[in-house]
Amino acid sequence: MSDFSANLLFSPCMHRHVVVVITGSRRFSQGEVTDDIQERLQCLDCLEYVTEAEVRAVWNGVSIEEIAALHVEDDLERLEVKE
């Protein structure tokens, strides 16, 4: 039998592909609007829910908006290469 209890070193996820996951609903009751809508950041690489502070720490203080802009630029470059 093999012993699989070896110590493995994992590199931390860089959270390069983060999306905003919105859950909840909005209701109308007696003329008033109530909701339980929540927005959370999820990394598509490691599937963990992360905070904006965790993403900024990995990206050296870059905001979520700047990261999103980088992804858009990357996508546009890929489209231009294919054409």
Image: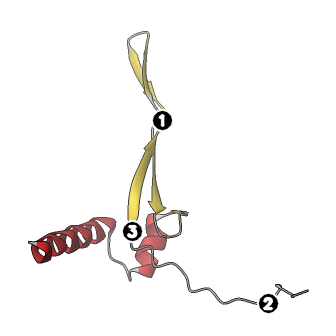
- Which image quadrant: the C terminus? bottom left
Labels 1 & 3 near each other (Cβ < 8 A): no
Q: Is 12 on the left or on the right of 78, as rendered?
A: right
Q: Are marks 3 and 2 in contact (CB under 8 Å)?
A: no
Q: Is residue 12 above or below residue 49?
A: below
What is the x, y in percent for residue 64? 33, 66
- Say which element carries label 3: loop
Which type of secondary structure does the marked residue at label 2 adopt?
Answer: loop
Q: Quadrant of residue 14?
A: bottom left
Residue 12, quarter of picture: bottom right
The type of residue carrying mark 1 is: Gly
Give the camera-side residue of 54 and 46: 46
| Number of numbered labels in the structure image | 3
User: What colouring method underlies this structural image?
Assistant: secondary structure
* Disc 1 crowd, CA 10 A, few/some/many (<14, 14-19, 20+): few
Q: Amino acid at mark 3?
A: His
Q: Which residue is mark 1?
A: 24
Measured as percent of width and height from the top left, residue 5 is found at: 83, 85
Left or right: 41, with 63 as reference point: right
Residue depth check, mark 1 versus mark 3: number of the one nearer the observer: 3
- Looking at the image, is mark 2 or mark 1 earlier in the sequence? 2
Q: Which residue is mark 3?
A: 17
Q: Residue furthest top?
A: 30
**Circle 2 sits on which residue?**
6
Residue in view at x 47 percent, y 60 percent: 42
Which label belongs to residue 63? none
Residue 47 versus residue 60 in the image, above or below? above
Q: Is residue 65 left or right of residue 60?
A: left
Screen quadrant of the N terminus: bottom right
The residue depicted at 24 percent of the width and 73 percent of the height is 70
